[in-house]
Amino acid sequence: MATYQEARVAAFELTDPATRTAALDAAVDQLEAGFGLTLTSAQIDELNAILDSR
C-alpha cells in the first residue's frame, strides 16, 4: 500500500496531464498485481479517498 501511495504522490507532481494519468494508471496496475486483484473504479476511488484523508 505504501508503494501505491508513493507512486500516487509522484504522479501528482508531474505537470503533463497525459504523463500524470499514465503514472496513476501504472500505480493502480502495480497495486492490483501486488495483491492479485482487479479493482473497480469505485474501489480505487474509495482507497484514494482513505489515503487522501491521512
Image (cartoon, rainbow, N blue to C red):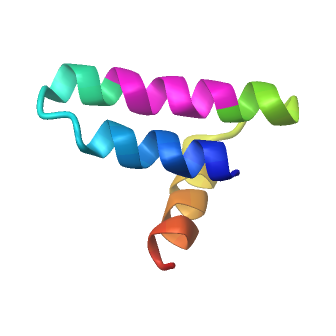
Taking the spot 34% from the left edge, 37% from the top edge, the residue there is: 11
Q: In the displayed image of the protein, which residue is found farthest to the bottom?
A: 54
Toward which corner of the image does residue 23 lie, by quadrant? top left
The magenta segment is 22-30
Q: Is residue 34 above or below residue 19?
A: below
Q: In the displayed image of the protein, which residue is found farthest to the left?
A: 15
Taking the spot 24% from the left edge, 43% from the top edge, the residue there is: 13
Left or right of residue 22, residue 6 in this image:
right
Residue 23 covered by magenta stretch:
yes
Toward which corner of the image does residue 31 lie, by quadrant? top right
Q: Position of residue 12 (x, y in %)?
A: 28, 44
Toward which corner of the image does residue 37 lie, by quadrant? top right
Q: Is residue 16 above or below residue 8?
A: above
> How many numbered badges does the structure rendering display?
0
Q: Position of residue 17 (x, y in %)?
A: 16, 29
Q: Position of residue 19 (x, y in %)?
A: 25, 21
Near-viewer residue (38 or 12): 12
- Dominant SS of magenta comes to helix
Near-viewer residue (32 or 45): 32
Left or right of residue 4, residue 48 in this image:
left
Left or right of residue 16, residue 12 in this image:
right
Left or right of residue 43, residue 20 in this image:
left
Taking the spot 51% from the left edge, 55% from the top edge, the residue there is: 45
Q: In the displayed image of the protein, which residue is found farthest to the right?
A: 36
Taking the spot 12% from the left edge, 34% from the top edge, the residue there is: 15
Q: Position of residue 2 (x, y in %)?
A: 65, 52
Q: Is residue 22 above or below residue 47?
A: above
Residue 36 covered by magenta stretch:
no
